[in-house]
Amino acid sequence: MAKEEPLSTSKDLKELQKKLSLLVESIQNNLKVIAFMKSPVGQYLDRHPFMALTVLVFVAMSAIPVGFFLLIVVLTALAAFVGVILLEGLVISVGGLSLLCVLCGLSFVSLAMSGTIIVSYVMVSSLFNYWFPPRPLTQQNSSGDCQLAMKSADLEGLYQE
């Protein structure tokens, strides 16, 4: 049994090596990789493998913090938009309810003031009528007509003469 394990392990390693070589070959044949390797940066990294490994490790390690930062930025922006909408809705609702309360209070105050003004008018007019009664007509003819009727009769008499 001990001899069978190394054979299967070596067989597994050969399969893994074939898969890795196919993967490396597919990456090297990728058009974007070929274009990058022809650029000055790609040629520099090809001549300096330690720098290439450092850049690769840095990019791989910085992907997660940069991804979290971008996720936080997007979530914060969405929360701000939703918060603004909710805050605006809350302000409009509170403002509308406040306006409704103020208008209802003004309607009650205007009813009370109108009632007070009407009662005051009736009281003042009745007090004026009590304190200063209307003057009685001083000149009346025998038929009970007012002074104006008398004057018109005098005018008629003048025209007849």
Image: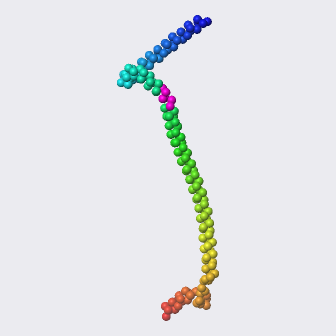
Q: Quadrant of residue 37?
A: top left
x, y percent for residue 20: 48, 15
Total residue callouts? 0
Q: Does 2 sit above or below residue 98?
A: above
Who is closer to the viewer here, 77 or 104? 77
Residue at x-position 61% and y-position 80%? 128
Judging from the image, the colouring scheme is rainbow
Which residue occupies 59% across, 87% down?
137
- Residue beneath the point at 60% across and 70% down: 117
Residue 104 drawn at (x, y percent): 60, 59
Q: Residue furthest front?
A: 50
Q: Magenta stretch?
A: 60-65
Question: Relative to 116, is 103 above or below?
Answer: above
Image coords of residue 94 (percent x, y): 58, 52
Residue placed at 42% from the left, 18% from the top?
28
Does 64 appear in magenta?
yes
Q: What is the residue that sits farthest to the bottom in this orientation?
A: 161
Magenta stretch, overall SS: helix
Residue 31 seen: no
Using the rendered view, name the quadrant where residue 103 is placed.
Answer: bottom right
Question: Magenta stretch: residue 1 in it?
Answer: no
Question: Who is closer to the viewer here, 69 or 83?
Answer: 69
Q: Is residue 56 left or right of residue 112?
A: left
Q: Can residue 47 be seen by looking at this rendering?
A: yes
- Does 111 sit above or below residue 128? above
Percent x, y of residue 93: 57, 50
Question: Is the N terminus in the top left, top right, bottom left or bottom right quadrant?
Answer: top right
